Structure formats: C-alpha cells, structure tokens
Image: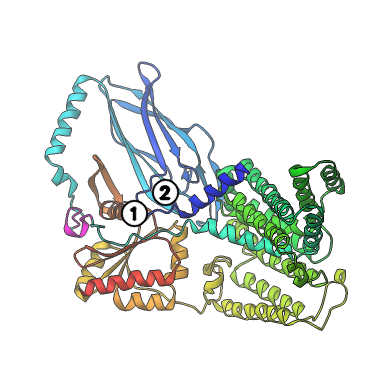
Amino acid sequence: MRRSFFLILTFIAAMFSTQAFAQIVNPVKWSIDLNMTDDTHGQIVMKATIQDGWHMYSNEVDPSVGPTPLSLTFSTLEGAELVGDLKASKESVKKHDDMFDADLSWWIDEVTITQDFKITDKSYNIDGYIRFSACNDENCVPPAKESFSFTSGASAAAETAQAAAADANNDQADAAPVVAGGTDPNGALWAPVDFTGTDQQETGDTSSMWYIFFTCFLGGFVALMTPCVWPMIPLTVSFFLKKGKSRAKSITDAFIYGASIIVIYLALGLIITAFFGASALNALSTSAVCNIIFFLLLVVFAISFFGAFDIKLPASWSNKIDSTAEKTTGLLSIFFMAFTLTLVSFSCTGPIIGTLLVEAASTGDKFGPAIGMFGFSLALAIPFCLFAMFPSWLQSAPKSGGWMNTVKVVLGFIELALSLKFLSVADLAYGWHILDREIFLALWIITFVLLGLYLLGKYNFSHYGPADSSIGVFRFFLAMISLSFAVYLVPGLWGAPLKGVSAFVPPLYTQDFNLYERALTEYEDYEEGMRVAAQEGKPVLIDFSGYGCVNCRKMEGAVLDNEGVHNMINDNFVVIKLMVDEKRNLPQPMVVEENGKKVTLETYGDKWSYLQRHKFQANAQPYYVIVDNGGSLISGPFSYDENIPRFTEFLDKGIKGYKK
C-alpha cells in the first residue's frame, strides 16, 4: 500500500506541475575538451548529454529531408590540420520518421563525438562550433550551436586576450551587423519584451496524464459489464457479508479486496514501466514495427470479442491461486481472492487491458502504463466496495444476461476501429499508401455502420446465437450514435477536416481528392510583416513554428483552421509565420552576442530562432504572441493548447489592447 500511496502522490503532483509558459528549452548539454594523444596529434572531444525523452539528430541525416544534421565547422584552423572524419562513441538509432517521411538517425541519452587533428605549428589556434538539432515526440528546438576555442603558446593567448578586448570595445558594432533589408537586432522591433502584467499561458502537455487516467478508468467500468466480471460482484459481496461477524467487518474486507485489485493491476503497470523505461516507451510510440504489432494485437482482441475464440490464461494458474486463498487467512486470503478474480476474468478483461496498455504505452509517457492501470483497477474496485456498504443496491442492479455479450461485441468493433490508427502510423512511416485518408475513413464508416446495424438487431455472430429484433431504448440510442458518427465521417472523403477525429485519421496531404481549402495570408519575414502591419494599422500575430514541429501542425489543424478563429485572424491581424528551422541562407551572415558569446546567424532559421530567444526569452514551438507596430507585447504568449475559446480570448485581448 505504501507504493500505491507514493504513486498516487506522484500522479497528483504530475497533474498540477505545469510550466508557466514556453521558456528556453535546452535538451542537449555539451562538454567540449581538447585531448592531446602525443606531441603532434590530438582530439577535440565533444560529449553531448541528451535530456530524457529527447533525441539529437546525427551527422548522417540528409539535410534536404527536414531536420538539421549534426555538423562541425571551423572558423579558424591555424597551425593544425584535420585527420579523418567525425567519430561517434556509439551507433545512432536509425528509423523511418513519418513526420519527415524519410529514414533518419539520431542519438538518445548521451554520445561523445571526436575529431582527430594534427599539429603543424607549435602555436596553433582552433576556433569553431558544433551545430545540432533535437526533438522529442511533441516539440523540436531550433538548430543551435555550441562554440569552442583552443590555443597554445603565450603569444597566441596574448593575441586572444587582445582580440577579446577589442571585441569588448566594439560590442555595439559587432552585435548590430548589417543585413539586406536594414535589419537591426538592437532596434526597437528586436528589443526584448516586458512580460510584467501579462497572462502567462499554460501549455497543454500535462493533459496527457489525465487522458490516460480517464480513458483507462472508463475502460475499467466497461470491463465491469462483461460476463466474466459482473456476475462475480454479487457472489463476492455476499461472501463478505456472510463471512463477516459484523457489517463493519464485511465493509472492511470489501475495501481490502478492492485495494488488492488496485495493487495487482498497479503492479502490472509498474512492471511495464520498469521493464521498458521512458526512452523505450517513447520509441514504442514512434516505431513503425511496434505499431504494426499493436495493430495485429487489437485485431486479435476484436476477433476474440466477436466470439471466434477466448483468450484465457492457463487454468492451472487460477486453480493454484484459488487453493492458496482457501489455505490462507486474513489479509493474505483476501488478496489471493482478488488475484483469482483477475485470472478468471482475463478472457474478458485481457483484451481491454491490452488495448489500454497499448494506448498508454504509445503516448510515450513513462508513467503511462502505471497511471492507466491505476485508473482501470479503481473502476473495477469501486462497485465491490459500494455494494458491500449498501447491499440493498444489489436488488436493483442489472441481472446477468445476454446484454453482456452485446457489450463484448461493441468492444470488438471499437477495438477494430482503433487498430487502424496504429496501422496508419506504420503506413505513413513506410510510405506504403495502402491506408491513405480516404481509405481509412471508408473503413471507419463501414465499421460504425455495421456496429449500428448490429445494435439494431439486424444480425448477430453465430457464437452468440440468432439476432434479436427486439431491442431496448438504450441500445437503440447507441445505434443512433454509431450511425450518426458514420454519417459525420462521410464529408471527410471529400476533404472536410473532421476536427473531432483529427488525432486519429491520417493527415489531409495523404488524400488524393480534396475540395476543402482555407489559407491565411502569412508573411515569412519579420521586418516585412511589421512594415505591412504599420501601413494597414493592424496588430501583428507572430507564429514561431517549424517544419518538424508536430504540435504546430496540430494547432494549425485544430485551432487556426477553425472557421471562427480563421475569420477573426484574417479580419484583424497581420500574420507573420517564422520557421525556426528554415535552411535558406541569409544574404549576409549576422554576428550577435548571446550569453557572453559571439554567435553567427547564417540561415533564416537561425535568425528567427534568435529573434524568439532574444525578444521573447523562449525557444519552443508552437509559440504565439501579439505585438503592436512598435514590437511591444500586447497579448500572450500562447503555447500549445487546442482550447479554441482560450485561443479566441488571447486574440480578443490583442485586438482590444491594440485599439487602446
């Protein structure tokens, strides 16, 4: 119970620990040293420590497909020459990334990169930087640089000190380079904003834990309705009432029984978490092979619920646990009784547990399976405790019957529909194009039409006997819901966005026939967009985004593409969309000072990333702010949150603030 209590506290803490808003994110820490192997040969040793859940792309990535590959650049190489290529301390992970639709490679946890060199002059001077990019399952940080400088000899050190002094005397000139268009990073448009008195927007990332908990909690209540569990409730409660010397003792035993159920399923979740770990769970959520396995598992579970076969644990297991429960007494006896229930009911709960664990694991959250099993077991345990406290409720509870088989069949259809989600991930990863958006929607439409017809009693599976044309009111309304959902999906065959299921169906770009089109006028250059806004007398909505940003695409589909939001933006704002991973080179590199270091901005992505860091003290995407024509903040910041009313409120505040 102590472990259960600790996990509950961890769960509650995780729910309420949110970031105020998107601060500077630095998932890769570098340690760079010079190691001389002899008098004339040495190595530049660059050790990267990668934050848990993130991955850093390797130097083997093709720069034309999306993420920036790791690279080493030397601005000064005097008195030394390079020997060979970069070497890594371990092999990179090679996978197909469905976001970029390309084979990519990256490192996780940590890696050491080395570059050999040879000394050609006793006084050498080596200056350069390593360029890298990193992502997790939800965000990507823009490409960043880590600089290094190594010299030898007193004269070289003196020259370096003199150069540093000269740089210090000319900071203003060096930090304000001239770029085509008259860009001035020290000008008013680039001046850091003042967040005092602004609403600090919370991110929506922590909602995934609530999603896992409530999904599995609902799954536990559904499992109660199956023929393997529901009949056990009156039998178990009656046993406690007859065995107990008093009603208080019976209630205590029932609560211990419920707590035992929670401990058993919680242990299952903890074992999965401990066995896989956070990094492995993240890999599971993106692995094409794992998603194919998940698809096949859910199909097997669905076929089982349709009555083709039962998934059972060996009978010897439940018999042994049952006999152990009879031989023991006290708390241990009740615990083994709960264990017997979990084994006996596995033919019904197993597919549900498997589906929930697959969903929890695919989120990539290290606490996902444990939190999921806590929610599932809590739903299972509650009825046993309540009926023990109020035995009279058993008289009005639904009696066991054929309706429980209906529950199993309905679950079979739902699992069949969910399985397509995992097959879709693999299809996108491998580029098979066997499950493009219209094919996916067609299969879902057929699935939910068949479910609706089943609920109306038009047919039945042979394992459950002939169809019953006489149905209840509740079953009738369920049929209406299923058929209505199928009709809702139909416009998606012609490109309708289908906001309600956008997280499940394949992206619109996989659809061949698309009549739906809505686009905002967006400026790709900060200075140009600010000039247009001043001319039109409108506030500016700045959208810091990235080609490799998954949550940016989600926000665009779920929020910015909403008709009301779209019209509100189009009528009232000038939109500047800045891609922080843009690889086009600037007409002239910019040299700026950041955190006491000289940083060279070579690409437009570098420039927009620096703008976000320098002006808004943030580097995660998506990131939305509203500024006036002088670059001062009037609303925001707003990070990833698919709550449309909240985003509308953010826009409305910007409109009113600009008018003032």
User: Does residue 296 appear in this view?
Assistant: no
**Which residue is the site of mark 2?**
68
Q: Which callout, 2 or 1, points at the residue further toward the start of the chain? A: 2
- Are circles 2 and 1 on residues that touch, CB within 8 Å? yes
Looking at the rendered image, the quarter that the N terminus falls into is: top right
Coordinates of residue 457 in the picture (x, y in percent): 79, 80
522 left or right of 370 in image = left
Coordinates of residue 359 in the picture (x, y in percent): 62, 57
Give the Cα separation between the discs numbered 2 and 1: 11 Å
Q: Which residues are magenta?
A: 183-192
- Indicate yes or no whether the magenta region holds residue 190: yes
Q: Please, what is the three-letter code of the amino acid marked with disc 2?
A: Thr
Give above or below for 149 relative to 507: above
Comparing 625 with 85, the one in front is 625
Secondary structure type for disc 2: loop
297 left or right of 600 in image = right
Toward which corner of the image does residue 325 lie, by quadrant? top right
Q: Which mark is residue 605?
A: 1
How many numbered discs?
2
Coordinates of residue 319 in the picture (x, y in percent): 86, 47
159 left or right of 378 in image = left
- Indicate yes or no whether the magenta region holds residue 313: no
